[in-house]
Amino acid sequence: MKNKLLILICALAAQAAWAQKTTITVAAFPAVDDIVKAALPEWQKKNPNVEVKVVGREYADHHTAMTTALATSTGLPDIMTVEYGYLGRFSQSGGLEDLDKAPYNAAELTKRIVAFAVAQGRTSTHGQTALPTDIGPGAMFYRTDVLQKAKVTESELTQSWDSFVQSGQKIKKASGAYLVAHARDVKDIVIRTGIPEGEGVYFDAQGKSVIETSPRFKKGFEMAQKIRAEGLDAKINAWSNEWGESLKRGTVTVQMMGAWLGGHLQNWLAPNTAGLWRSTVLPERVATSWGGTFYAIPKNAKNKELAWDLVKHLTLNRQQQQMAFEKFNAFPALLEAQSGPFFEQPVAFLGGQKARVEWKTTASQIKPTQVFKNDSVAEEIVNAELDLVLNKNKPIDQALKDAHRLVQRRASR
């Protein structure tokens, strides 16, 4: 009888404890969902009565679901993961908490994070809407075997954009390999060069398009046109099957992206090419960011206090940030996490190169720029006009004028 009573008491106690558990939801995309899951055991030591539900969706599906959730205020998570490309749209929605305000008071905390990424998560109208967790220092990955065959040096690739194109000509002649996957890749880097502080890629501080007036765009279109005219791009889009094959086979020599591409090449894009790749700076030593991940708390989230505590653990805990880098190639936004033995270790996939040190240097040189609600729309329009230049010989000045007009029209709606 005593044993039955004891069992009953224990069962009731367990039910009571479970009833007191709080569930918070984190919405994420690959591989951020895995990073969050890996962080939970340590965080739950301090929060044993909190269950964390991680809702993982594919990249596009996740951002579509979050767009709908913000528009309708239904199905909102407690923590929303946002990739840089969607940041302007989400930040300007008015549906995210300003983390600079009480009870968050993030202004002091953000001094510990790289300034350019903090600036990307802040807007003039809605404050600090998101905290960065990882960043993408721009890097150029190239095939050493192709360069050796063409007798081209790394410094020739990086010295200037003209030297970059000349290198491509040598490579094409000696090996048949293309310099880049798509001429658009070059335009994407050039238009992100020399952006005045307080402005964005496509808009000035007042939200007006700079596409027609900024020399960045004219130079970017001219360089892309030159690449296409010389037959130096394979005319294939990033993330397509053809693109993946070109990286595996060495039919494309160079890919400029965030430093995180090294992990993708190693883990799933081209794992059998270990030792054939190296990483270096972008041409003319351009320091720019390529992507990055942010955490935001919706205004209508149900468990904001717990959500904020978990966001702080994910973004401001040195051990957590370093774990995410070591296991998932998520380059840390937290400054104090950008040091230690791991940064000095040779990267076997990159032929023993100590590439992380260079990525850190690039990150320290990136200037803060702003994001805007219509960045993704502007990008689509600019790319469509570039396609007309590349494929239909549309004059560059007219293409930029038309892009500017279309972007202004969309932005003023």
Image (cartoon, rainbow, N blue to C red):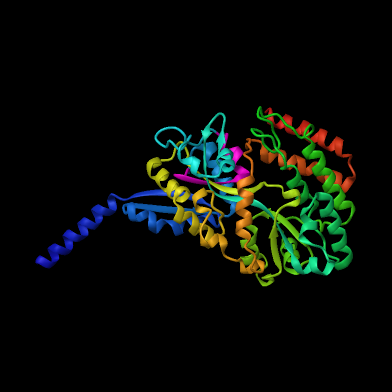
Q: Is residue 275 above or below residue 142?
A: below
- Expressed as whole percent of the image width and height from the top left, the position of residue 345 reads 57, 65
Residue 330 appears in the figure: yes
- Expressed as whole percent of the image width and height from the top left, the position of residue 176 reads 86, 66
Q: Is residue 1 magenta?
A: no
Q: Is residue 86 magenta?
A: yes
Q: Which residues are magenta?
A: 76-93
Q: Is residue 8 above or below residue 206?
A: below
Q: Is residue 96 above or below residue 16?
A: above
Q: Which one is nearer the viewer's eye here, 279 or 243? A: 279
Q: Which one is nearer the viewer's eye here, 69 or 395? A: 395
- Expressed as whole percent of the image width and height from the top left, the position of residue 169 reads 87, 59
Residue 34 appears in the figure: no
Q: Residue at x 69, y 27 (%)?
A: 412
Quadrant hosting residue 281: bottom right
Q: Residue at x 44, y 44 (%)?
A: 78
